[in-house]
Structures are given as C-alpha cells and as structure tokens.
Image: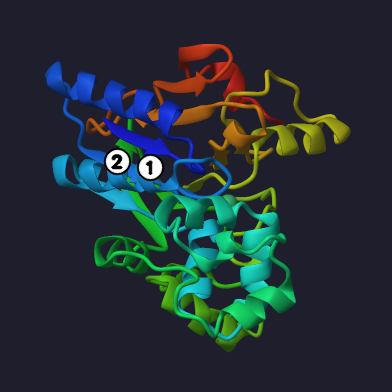
Amino acid sequence: MIYVIADIHGMYDPFKILVDYIYKRASKTEQVSKIILLGDYIDCGPSSKQVIDLIIKLKTDFDTVTLFGNHEEMLLSFYHKTFNHVKTGNFWLSYNGGLQTILSFYPQSILFRKEQFPNEKMISDLLHYEDVFKLEPEYLDFFDNLSSTYQIKLNQSDKELDLLFSHSVLSPRFSLEEQLAIKDWKGLYQFLDKNSCDLEETHIWNRQLLTHQLKDNLTVIHGHTPTRYYRQLTKLLKLWEDEENSPFVVREKKNRKLVQIDIDTGLIYGGALTMLAIDDTPNVENIFPYYVSVDPKKGFRHKLFAKKELDLT
Ligand SMILES: [Mn+2]
C-alpha cells in the first residue's frame, strides 16, 4: 500500500494519529511500500518542528517521498534571502502563519523581542541581523532537499495508470516535461526566470480545475486547495455536491478518465487531515480502496473511496 498525506500545517496531533495508523498496518504484515507527503508541513499550526521531526523519523522507517509546498518555498525564500525575500518574508510572516513556524524552530528570534506585528519595513530592517531565523543543519538539509513532484506508474486491471504527485495542480500553460524537470526549489526559480511567470502559476500555488488529463492516463494527486473551495466552485457550475471532508475528484466528461484528486480537506480551516491509500499490488481491480481522515472534532474515520466520489460530471 502507498499512503499519501497533504497539508499538515504544523498540526502534530492529527498527523500523529495517521502515522500511528501506518505503523499499525505495517506491523500487521501489510506491506507499506511507500509514503508520499505532498508538502505544506509547516505554518499556521503550533507544532511545525514536531511535525518535521516525525517526518524525519518516517523517512528512516519507510520509503518516504517528501515534496515541497508553497509554505516550504516561503520559508526557503526567507531563509536563503532570495531575490524576493523581503516581500515573501512579509507575506509569509504576516499572512501565512510563518511566525508560528519561526516560534516553533527558533523561539529566541529577535522577532519575538519586538512589540509590533511584523511589516515589510520591519522585516527589511531585521534582515540585517543574524538572529532572525536559524535552523539546525538537520532541518535546513530537510527543507533544502524536498522534491518538486513524484511519478508512479501502476496497473489497474488491464490499464496502465500514471500517477503524478504534486503539491498543487500542474499548469496546462507550460509543457508537462518542463514542469516535471523541476527537481527542487532552486529548479523552481530557474523555471520562473525562464518562463517569466509568477509562483502563483506554478504547481505549488495553481488552483485550477483541469477539464482534461495533461497527458493520456495521467492523474494528478495533489493538496493545497481545500476541497471545500472546489465544491463551492463546482456547485455554482452545478457539477457536484457531496460531504465536505472527502477527497475531491475530477474526471473527464467524455470518457470518465481521472484527471485530478485533491486530498486537502482543510484541516486548518476547521476540516480534517486526510490520507489516501493506494493499492500498488500489480493488476489490482481498484487502486483507490479507501481513505482515512482525522477531524479534530469528529475523530478518526475510515471510508471507502466511494464510487459516488468518482462521479463528478
Ligand atoms: Mn499549499
């Protein structure tokens, strides 16, 4: 089985429940062949450091793929003082929960000795100081080496399925090859330069609903956009209504091919943390047997990845 989780956002407790579930399954002779984490481990919630510690442990016990999301990109841009770091820093610290991450990793930061909330000028002034944000080498190494996307080919009955894991949706505006060639956050900046585009258009921010597969039999599995947002959007288009905290699935209208599956069920917006199970047994009949989710209010749920959810259009 392959397990996929997205958008943990510094919320250690629900993440730990999912991780315990994986260990339990693995101890009961289930083969856990891979864990794929789709980014946004940090920010907003209080326990970003604890979340990263648990991911580092997972990496030693399982074959674990770790992608970066837009929140890791903001941290890296601020930390490494890239071209845009003052603007990004302000955006990250003031509007995207970055302060909680710095508090979690580096509570002695000069930021917490100031009495006002950060603004662009303050950040620009503070960046001359050394003790704004420091990461221990183990953590810096973790963030620096996050991957951009990940791909797996699986056989379901007689078809070959190509699963593409990404923080968010890849853009139909750029060639698929070029987007897949991005290896890490540095590669992402080269991509931005080359295509003169903004981060919002890339696979860590893009919120598009695709109408067609980007390539034949290719399904994008992603997080980043709470499924509630897509449900509201498509409700207006009269396409879809369903309970909020389940994966959101898009199929091609004509031939029902799977286009994208969003598993961000909006934990930090009062939703749940969801984990998708993928059965990678060769030629299995159903590669998406179930998902599990932890809702801080309603608790743990184990649900079939129901047929209903595969009927968007
Ligand atoms: Mn995101």
**In this view of the protein, which residue sits in the foreground, 11 or 133?**
133
For the residues labelled 1 and 2, say whether their Cβ atoms are less than 8 Å apart: yes
Q: Is mark 1 within 8 Å of ligand 1?
A: no
**What residue appears at the point 37 percent right and 63 percent down from the top-left corner?**
143
Residue hosting label 1: 51
- Give residue 5's position: percent from left, percent from top: 42, 38
23 relative position to 178: left or right: left
State which quarter of the image contains the C terminus: top right
Q: Residue at x 59, y 23 (%)?
A: 309
Look at the image and tell me in which quarter the N terminus lies. Answer: top left
Q: Is residue 132 left or right of residue 282?
A: right
Q: CA distance from mark 1 to mark 2?
A: 5 Å
Q: Amino acid at mark 2?
A: Leu
Q: Which residue is nearer to you in this view: 229 or 289?
A: 229
Which residue: 34% across, 34% down? Answer: 3
Q: Quadrant of residue 249?
A: top right
Snapshot quadrant of residue 296: top right
Scheme of colours in the image: rainbow
Residue corresponding to mark 2: 54
Query: Quadrant of residue 298 in the image?
Result: top right
**Furthest residue to the right?**
236
Viewer-proximal residue among 65 and 178: 65
Q: Where does the image place residue 182, in percent across and percent down from the top left?
A: 43, 72
**Residue flagged by tag 1: what amino acid is it?**
Val
Q: From what the image shows, is residue 50 above or below residue 95? A: above
